[in-house]
Amino acid sequence: MRTFGLNKSPLNYLAHLFLSGTDEDLRLGNFIADSVRGAQVLLYPERVQQGIRLHRLIDSYTDGHPVVAETKERLRPKFRKYAGVVADVYYDHFLAANFQTFSAQPLAEFAKEAYTQVQSRPELLPERVQHFLPYMVRHNWLVSYAKVEGITRALHGLSSRTKFDSGMETAGEELVQNYAFYQMEFERFFPQLQAYVHQLIQLGIRN
């Protein structure tokens, strides 16, 4: 679940926020983690630090998972090094589109709560997050993920921000054409990720 320097674009924020549970500090750390570099993590309160570490552990687990590897392998001929970015966006789409399967809380209510919590801690937001957060809230990225049209817009935006020809402007078409395959892979992967994160939180989050 890496962002390849595309931190100002809508990637997998929904998954990271959702997997943090109801702990506001853990959720905040998980949300800002891509904008926190190295030892900067030590500048934050302990529970926010744990959220940042949780984000990185989720990324590592996802990057090494065999089901995710299947998704990226199907995407790689078209999107090459951006296959992982496209996979992230697809998986957040399936989480959003099937949110009621994973949460008793409606997606729109969850998104509103998450925006409110993050915005209530402006002193802890890195500069990059401060720049994109108002746009994220205004355009309701978390809810927009649920529609293929929203994901397609996100992928077009990502394509325009890459230094090289990524092909991501066609990734919405790829999702539609092979929707069932990507959905099955998400359904195989996400419950395992949930179980992994639950264990991390129960045992205590360490590097």
Image (cartoon, grey):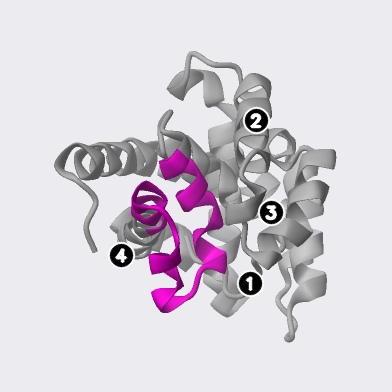
Mark closer to the chain start, 3 or 2: 3
Amino acid type, residue under disc 1 in the picture = Lys
Label for residue 64? 4
Residue 139 vertical position relative to residue 81 in the rendered view, above or below:
above
Where residue 96 sits, quadrant-wise, is top right
Residue 71 vertical position relative to residue 77 in the rendered view, above or below:
above
- Mark 4 closeness class: few <14, some 14–19, many ≥20 residues within 10 Å: few
Residue designated by label 2: 111
Q: Is residue 139 visible?
A: no
Label for residue 10? 3
Frontmost of labels 3 and 4 is: 3
Mark closer to the chain start, 2 or 4: 4
Q: Magenta segment range?
A: 25-52
In the picture as drawn, the residue positioned furthest to the top comes out as 104
In this view, the residue in front, 31 or 124, is: 124
Mark closer to the chain start, 3 or 1: 3
* Label 1: element kind: helix
Q: Is residue 181 left or right of residue 195?
A: right
* Label 2: element kind: helix
Report x, y in % for residue 133: 74, 51
Q: Is residue 2 left or right of residue 70?
A: right
Mark closer to the chain start, 1 or 2: 1
